[in-house]
Image (cartoon, rainbow, N blue to C red):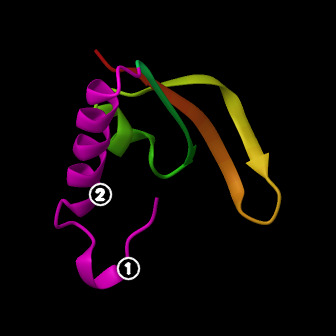
Amino acid sequence: MATIPDVRGQGHDRDLLHACFDHMRAKEASLLWCNARVVAPDFYKHLGLQTIGPEFDIEGIGPHYVMWKAVV
């Protein structure tokens, strides 16, 4: 996920993920995962996601972590 500089820090990414969680609950989905850039885990951790496994590289993009959350 990325936001343009003009709207960063305004909570749009957080709101989008909360909408995602609500949609998942409505569809009875229970697990969300993502590849998070190494600068982003703290943001995702504040929303309840956890890292799993070591840092890895996505060619042409850079280092990432796999993150996940059980949505209940």
Q: Which is more toward the observer, 63 or 25?
A: 25
* Farthest bottom residue in view: 6
Q: Which residues are magenta?
A: 1-29
Percent x, y of residue 15: 20, 52
Is 42 left or right of 9, judged from the image as shown? right
- Asked whether the beta carbons under mark 1 and mark 2 sit within 8 Å of each other, the answer is no
As helix, strand or loop, the secondary structure at mark 1 comes to: loop
Is 7 left or right of 54, judged from the image as shown? left
Is 48 left or right of 63, judged from the image as shown? left
Number of other residues with Cα within 10 Å of mark 2, as a class: few under 14, some 14 to 19, many 20 or more: some
Percent x, y of residue 56: 74, 39
Which residue is depicted at the point 37% across and 39% down? 44
Residue 13: give its label.
2
Rendered view: 61 above or below 70: below
Q: Which is more toward the observer, 3 or 17?
A: 17
Which residue is depicted at the point 28% across and 15% down? 72
Which residue is depicted at the point 29% across and 37% down? 23
Quadrant position of residue 6: bottom left
Q: How many marks?
A: 2
Q: CA distance from mark 1 to mark 2?
A: 11 Å
Kindly identify the amino acid type of the residue bearing the numbered disc 2: Asp
Is 34 left or right of 18, judged from the image as shown? right
Number of other residues with Cα within 10 Å of mark 1, as a class: few under 14, some 14 to 19, many 20 or more: few
Quadrant position of residue 11: bottom left
* Farthest front residue in view: 27
Kindly identify the amino acid type of the residue bearing the numbered disc 1: Ile
Is residue 19 inside the magenta stretch?
yes
